[in-house]
Amino acid sequence: MKRYVSISAVILAAFVVIALAGGSSALEANDCPTACNRYVQCVATAFGREPSASEREQLFGGCMAACRRHQERVLQCYNQSQNQCSAFHTCIQQSARE
């Protein structure tokens, strides 16, 4: 459980860095839930278990906050990942470094 929280915190931190980096959002706001649901699924896959309701709420909420601020970049990563968790995560990390 502790490892699950630490790794999910790192992934969530990548979204937060994107949120703090600035940017514009030209895409529809209703696309963020789709990307964030995928993000939560990726975290669950990485840990081999479904997150609890409170973990899911925390992961989804953090993702939504970042996506609302920078949905164009977050959704670009989501679309480019072609439904692959590792590609989605790598794109988010690279975006955080830019």
Image: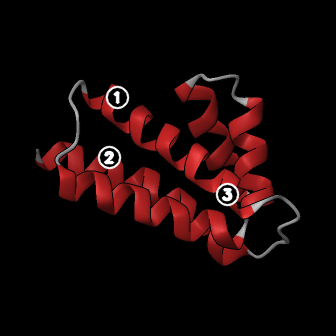
**Residue in view at x 41 percent, y 43 percent:** 40
- Secondary element under disc 1, as helix, strand or loop, is helix
Side of 2 where 13 appears, left or right:
right
Residue depth check, mark 2 versus mark 3: number of the one nearer the observer: 3
CB under 8 Å between discs 1 and 3: no
Q: What number is the disc on residue 30?
A: 3
Question: Dot 3, crowdedness within 10 Å: few (<14), some or many (≥20)?
Answer: few
Measured in 3D between alpha carbons, the distance from the residue under mark 1 to the one under mark 3, in whole angstroms, is 26 Å
Q: Indicate whether 33 appears above or below 17.
A: above
The amino acid type found where label 1 is placed reads Ala
Instruction: Residue 89: give x, y in percent of width and height.
Output: 56, 38
Instruction: Say which of 27 and 72 sits in front.
Output: 27
CB under 8 Å between discs 2 and 1: yes
- Secondary element under disc 2, as helix, strand or loop, is helix
Which circle's residue, 2 or 1, is located before the other in the chain?
2
Side of 81 where 65 appears, left or right:
left
Instruction: Say which of 14 and 50 sits in front.
Output: 50
Instruction: Residue 48: give x, y in percent of width and height.
Output: 24, 24
Residue under label 1, please give it. 46
- Secondary element under disc 3, as helix, strand or loop, is helix
Instruction: Residue 59: give x, y in percent of width and height.
Output: 37, 56
Residue under label 2, please give it. 7
Which circle's residue, 1 or 3, is located before the other in the chain?
3
**Residue in view at x 82 percent, y 72 percent:** 23
Measured in 3D between alpha carbons, the distance from the residue under mark 2 to the one under mark 1, in whole angstroms, is 9 Å
